[in-house]
Amino acid sequence: MLASTVFQKTKGTGYAYNKALKTTPFGRSDAVTRGGFAIMPHETAPLSLMLGIQKESILGISFVQLLENLHKRLETEAIDEFREHLKISLDRTERSINYEYQNVTEDQFEDPFDIDSYKGMLEDRFFMIEEVRKLSDELSILALFKHVEIHTKRVIKRHLPSIDSKKLFNINSLKQELPFTLEKVTNFNAFNELRLINNAIKHQGKVSAELARNFPSWQEGDEFPRLNNTYLRLYPQVKIYIESLVGQIASHSELNT
């Protein structure tokens, strides 16, 4: 009933958040808000409008600088929400199983020997929780890389429209098309490790030769352990990488010409 009410109130918006009419440098537009703070939409102004005002400044900031600042933010709220809700659910289930396991007694069964089968079932459920945690960590890695990849293509399309986005299908073509050395971007190694882990999860399901060759802390052929710590380690570094990458792209922006 609650879910039905929420979706009826937000029908056509795609978000269960409030919507506010917000004034922008380009006029009035609908902005999604959360907790009273406006969240800028993913898409910026049309290219024709961008080109028309590129040499003007807004509140002392050039349009290219404004665009650069907006693009430096990597939106990962959906991943954060997914991880938090799943963690809460799994932690609650794990506590329940542990309590049941510690407190079950033989007198609860018609046949006292059935307690062993019941405890075995609880152990299987506990094992499955750990498997779900591992899957959650892998999905988080895949989702983070997906966000980075899509965001990179979006920024390149805005600032360097002469580059054919179809050529940006892998790291080698990306390096070839960019007007600067990608390896010199801050925290490139964090991005590269994320990319290689992503590829290994998708294609091998274990540590690949390329991942082990580039990052010796990984051993080729090993099964991936829980990747939660790896995600937490790479997440802030990759956000810094995006900030640096966007800065480099903006410094070569074709909108300045």
Image (tube, helix red, strand yellow):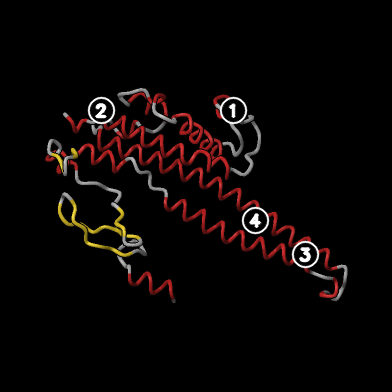
Q: Residue furthest front?
A: 60
Q: Nearer the viewer, mark 4 or mark 2?
A: 2
Can you tell which quarter of the image residue 184 is in? top left
Q: CA distance from mark 2 to mark 3?
A: 63 Å
Q: CA distance from mark 1 to mark 3?
A: 42 Å
Q: Nearer the viewer, mark 3 or mark 4?
A: 3
Which numbered marker is on residue 212?
A: 1
Which is more toward the observer, 65 or 116?
65
Instruction: Find numbered disc 1 in the image and state the secondary structure of the residue it sits on.
Output: helix
Q: Is residue 105 above or below residue 187?
A: below
Can you tell which quarter of the image residue 215 is in? top right
The residue that disc 3 covers is 102
Instruction: Find numbered disc 4 in the image and state the secondary structure of the residue it sits on.
Output: helix
Q: Amino acid at mark 3?
A: Gln
Q: Amino acid at mark 4?
A: Ile
Q: Give the class, few, some or many, for how many residues have Cα within 10 Å of label 4's Cα (few <14, many ≥20).
A: some
The residue that disc 4 covers is 129
